[in-house]
Image (tube, rainbow, N blue to C red):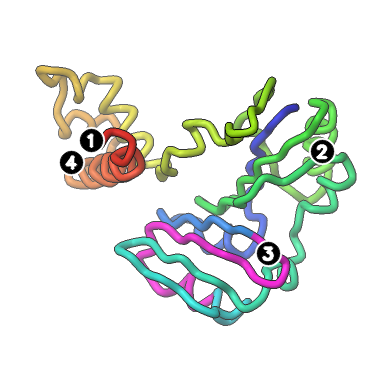
Amino acid sequence: MYEATFRIEGDGVYATLTAKTDTSVELWCNDHCDLLHIKNDTSEEILTDIRERVGVQDLVRQSEEVVVITDDCLKQHDENLVDEFLARHDCLLLPPLRYENGAKSCRVLALDSSNLTACYRDLASSEFSISVERKREIETVGHDTPLLTLDGLLPTLSPRQREAFITAYDTGYYEIPRQTTTSKIADSLDIERRTAEEHLRRAENKLIEALIEYVV
């Protein structure tokens, strides 16, 4: 069995709404409605669009995260769907769909790697702008072993947060004693020191919140 993650640029209204923001949306489709997990939502713009497009049954808000149950399924309102391509090549979609930075990420399963390749080529030859984020072979799956691995448990960092965190790590910011400063990290990224510190804190907070339950 093989798994691939396809990144499709500008596919769908949620992808468009997340462009040039730190907001991400995860979507679980239930045909009659959707469950949405919105992270880092700093404005009401995306919720307003959801209300107008598919309606909202209920929502729960905590800090910068919102869980929404919609009135309708997005499939009924969005024409840019990959379902027909997946069915054509005997591929399965693994929920949730993830929208961030103006793109949609789809985790896709197939029994044969050639099916994933054919599906990718079919999508690429259409109006979709697509790339492959990762691809792996799944050799065995125990009855009590989820398909999700550690990369599925880790939070999604924005491009700037990821860049700041990796730069900090690579330049020795987390060594004892520290080998660099946030000022030097900011210079490497060509941004202000306070901006670099903000990206770094947000990245650290996301990683800590995702992992803390496994170390306490």
Q: Do the residues labelled 3 and 1 touch (CB within 8 Å)?
A: no
User: Residue 38: percent from the left, percent from the top?
Assistant: 46, 61
Direction from residue 130 to residue 120 in the image, left or right: right
- Identified by mark 4, the residue type is Arg
Q: Quadrant of the N terminus?
A: top right
- Identified by mark 3, the residue type is Asn
Q: Do the residues labelled 4 and 3 touch (CB within 8 Å)?
A: no
The mark closer to the camera, 4 or 3, is 3
In this figure, which residue is indicated by the disc labeled 4? 193
Query: How far apart in space, not on screen, are marks 3 and 2 (Cα)?
Result: 24 Å
Number of callouts: 4
Sequence-earlier tag: 2 or 4: 2
Quadrant position of residue 55: bottom right
Magenta run includes residue 38: yes
Query: How far apart in space, not on screen, are marks 4 and 1 (Cα)?
Result: 5 Å
Query: How far apart in space, not on screen, are marks 2 and 4 (Cα)?
Result: 44 Å
Taking depth in this image into account, of 5 and 80 the one nearest to the observer is: 5
Q: Answer few, some or many: residues within 10 Å of disc 2's Cα (few below 14, many 20 plus, some between 14 and 19).
A: many
Taking depth in this image into account, of 40 and 61 the one nearest to the observer is: 61
The mark closer to the camera, 3 or 2, is 3
Q: Are marks 3 and 2 in contact (CB under 8 Å)?
A: no
At mark 2, the secondary structure is helix
- Could you say which disc has been placed on residue 30 in the image? 3
Q: Do the residues labelled 4 and 1 touch (CB within 8 Å)?
A: yes
In this figure, which residue is indicated by the disc labeled 1? 186
Seen at 48% across and 73% down, the residue is 47
Which segment is the magenta one?
29-49
Sequence-earlier tag: 1 or 2: 2
The mark closer to the camera, 2 or 4, is 2
Is residue 141 shown above or below 75? Answer: above
In this figure, which residue is indicated by the disc labeled 2? 119
